[in-house]
Image (tube, grey):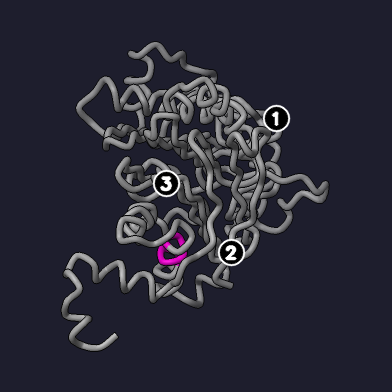
Amino acid sequence: MDRRRFLEIPVVGLPLLTASRAFGTARSNKAKMPVVVSTWDSGRTSNAAAWPILAKAGSSIDAVEAGGRASEDEPSCCVGLAAWPDRDGKVTLDSSIMKGNGDCGAVSFLERIKHPVSVARKVMENTPHVLLSGIGAQEFAVSQGFPLESGELSPDAEKEWKKWLEKSKYQPIINIENRKGTSQFIAPPYIFDDGTFNHDTMGTIAMDAKGHLAGMVTTSGMAFKIRGRAGDSPIIGAGLFVDDEVGAATSSGVGEEVIRTCGTHTVVEQMRLGRSPEAACREAVRRVVKRDPKKAKEMQVGFVALSKTGAIGAFAIQKGFSYTITSSKYVGGKVFQSKSWF
């Protein structure tokens, strides 16, 4: 392109041109409405609860909430009260939920409440706020009719917490979220050898038959974390961002790095500029890696995105990040592996 033709391009077109040349046209899955996408292979649990609602022309916000509740109810998902505790032996939960029109709600450091995703929705619908935390979040949940659970650890969680106390050591292990009953900062003795897989964060994004987008994230956070720690999951624009004009994105991995880069907001804004979901996720990963390349080689962060057109893509720092799609084409849910930086 010569200079004259370049100068004739409208200014608003320049970001699209730059994005196209920087990444080209990345290959993406393409789904017809409705569709639901969740992080990891255990996203089947969330998708299985969300899909019947979408298939009957229900709303995307109802679908993602149902998906979150199903994950919180499933002990093997390790995102609810059966999950592993913080270093003080207390299970604290984080969750967020968001509609494509910008309505959103979240809770963090929530104890003894079974369904934080539903509390997050109540925050969205029944308060002028976005995020409630700690005892205030718990009191609000009770006021909305959520019962206080016992707060006792599950037998498996208590066993692993006591085992962890013997060394009290944090050590990052890539993709440890995929391993049954484990989280991402656990020393090697906590890797199970039975070949089963799971995680401690579930992110779900969906588009309904009317083209409306919604998303949710629910998590027990980092196992044996410092008490009071909150990751990216309850932070809008970090662990979750949804915009009906563009698309939706969610993340999994080391939450602190996602917060530092406003990860999912970055993904959606990159899609707004014309990048495909995969290319947008890749750009968010690039920013994480660039901040500390040495550290990036020893951790995992992954993003998955759904565009307004139904295109789906993902990208991660390391190999091993997966996501599950359920649609009319993949009714039972199909797991895909994302591309990666390393």
Q: CA distance from mark 2 to mark 1?
A: 37 Å
User: Does the segment drawn in magenta span residue 284?
Assistant: yes
Residue 263: % across, % down: 38, 56
Q: Quadrant of residue 215?
A: top left
Residue 339 badge: 2
* Residue 93 to residue 30: above or below: above
Label 1, secondary structure: give it.
Answer: helix
Q: Is residue 291 left or right of residue 327?
A: left
- Residue under pointer 1: 155
Identify the residue at image location x=37%, y=24%: 138
- Location of the N terminus by quadrant is bottom left
Residue 143: % across, % down: 33, 13
User: Does the segment drawn in magenta span residue 214?
Assistant: no
- Location of the C terminus by quadrant is bottom right
Residue 181 badge: none
- Res. 165 visible in picture: no
Magenta segment: 280-285
- Residue under pointer 3: 309
Q: Amino acid at mark 2?
A: Lys
Q: Amino acid at mark 3?
A: Thr
The residue most toward the bottom is: 2
Identify the residue at image location x=50%, y=43%: 221
- Res. 265 visible in picture: yes
